[in-house]
Image (tube, helix red, strand yellow):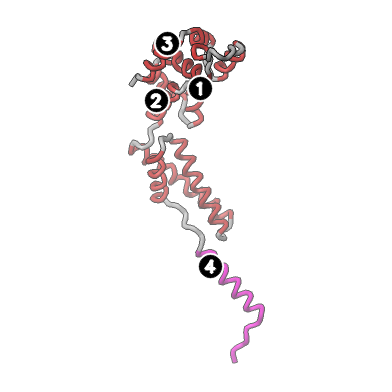
């Protein structure tokens, strides 16, 4: 005669059924193909660098790991899987570079010019590119190509134009409002110093008349 199932048997069977169901719900880890699709979707929307793309794909792996652990995968297994997938991430980055979708030098040149046009100093642009993982050599070459070499007149004109843009944003120097009192010169100099501008560039910008300042900004922003 078949043995009747006890309450203990029922509990074990229920636990096994629940565990099996949970294991079936664990999301599939992204392989090279999936990571490549993620990368293509990202670069289609954003200009990026190798470093930034690597961070993006790493976050995707981490999100997969979190979901997998919540679904029942042991945390150590999730971490081991993520480690095995990191070479695939590097392969995707190489593929995006070869495709031309990721180009640190091109990114740096474009970002340097755009940031300068919004009032960033050369020093501030370099600091920004460093946060994006662009190496110093690539950054220097991009700055020289986009803004001119530090010692030449083209670079000085670019730096002065950026300072004038910042002056216009802060309503100081040639852009101060006549119906408001002049700001403390020390405070004004501090604003520009914190943004990476040298004293001589700041003094030139602050002493310029409004018409010339506007002309210089327009001329710089019209550069190809």
Point out the tag, 3 or 2, that comes first from the N-terminus: 2
Residue 217: image quadrant is top left
Mark yes or no: residue 91 visible: no
* Distance between mark 2 and mark 1 Cα atoms: 14 Å
Is tag 3's residue or tag 1's residue first in the polypeptide sequence?
1
Give the answer, above or below, for where 37 lies relative to 104.
below
Q: Which residues are magenta?
A: 1-24
Residue farthest to the bottom?
Answer: 1
Q: Residue at (45%, 13%) from the top-left corner?
A: 160
* Closer to the camera in the image, 183 or 68: 183
Tell me, yes or no, whether the highlighted magenta stretch contains residue 121: no
Name the mark nearer the viewer: 3 or 1. Answer: 3
* Residue bearing the label numbered 4: 21
Do the CB atoms of the residues marked 2 and 1 lie less than 8 Å apart? Answer: no
Q: Earlier in the sequence, mark 4 or mark 2?
A: 4
Q: Which residue is mark 2?
A: 109
Q: Which of marks 4 and 3 precedes in the sequence?
A: 4
SS assignment for the magenta stretch, majority:
helix
Q: Residues within 10 Å of mark 1 (few under 14, many from 20)?
A: some
- Give the structural element (helix, strand or loop) at label 1: helix
Between the residue at mark 4 and the residue at mark 2, the CA separation in whole angstroms equals: 52 Å
The earlier-in-sequence mark between 1 and 4 is 4
Dots 1, 4 in contact, CB < 8 A: no
Q: Which residue is mark 3?
A: 211
> Which element carries disc 4, helix, strand or loop?
helix
Classify mark 3: residues with Cα within 10 Å, few (<14), some (14-19) or many (20+).
Answer: few
Q: Are marks 4 and 2 in contact (CB under 8 Å)?
A: no
Q: Which residue is mark 1?
A: 124
Under circle 3, the secondary element is helix
**Residue 26 pos. (x, y %):** 51, 60
In space, the residues marked 3 and 2 are separated at their CA atoms by: 29 Å
Residue drawn at x 47%, y 21% is 119
């Amino acid at each position: 005669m078949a043995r009747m199932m006890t309450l203990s048997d029922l509990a074990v069977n229920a636990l096994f059924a629940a565990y099996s169901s949970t294991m079936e719900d664990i999301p599939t880890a992204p392989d090279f193909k999936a990571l490549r699709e993620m990368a293509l979707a990202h670069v289609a929307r954003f200009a990026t660098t190798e470093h930034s793309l690597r961070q993006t794909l790493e976050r995707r792996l981490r999100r997969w790991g979190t979901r997998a652990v919540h679904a029942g995968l042991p945390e150590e297994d999730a971490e081991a899987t993520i480690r095995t997938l990191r070479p695939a991430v590097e392969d995707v980055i190489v593929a995006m570079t070869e495709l031309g979708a990721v180009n640190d030098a091109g990114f740096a040149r474009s970002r340097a010019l755009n940031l300068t046009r919004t009032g960033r100093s050369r020093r501030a642009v370099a600091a920004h590119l460093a946060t994006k993982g662009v190496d110093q050599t690539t950054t220097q070459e991009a700055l020289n190509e986009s803004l001119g070499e530090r010692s030449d007149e083209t670079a000085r004109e670019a730096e002065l134009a950026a300072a004038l843009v910042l002056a216009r944003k802060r309503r100081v120097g040639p852009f101060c409002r006549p119906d408001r009192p002049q700001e403390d010169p020390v405070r004004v100099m501090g604003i520009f110093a914190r943004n990476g501008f040298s004293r001589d560039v700041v003094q030139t910008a602050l002493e310029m008349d409004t018409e010339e300042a506007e002309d210089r900004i327009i001329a710089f922003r019209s550069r190809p």
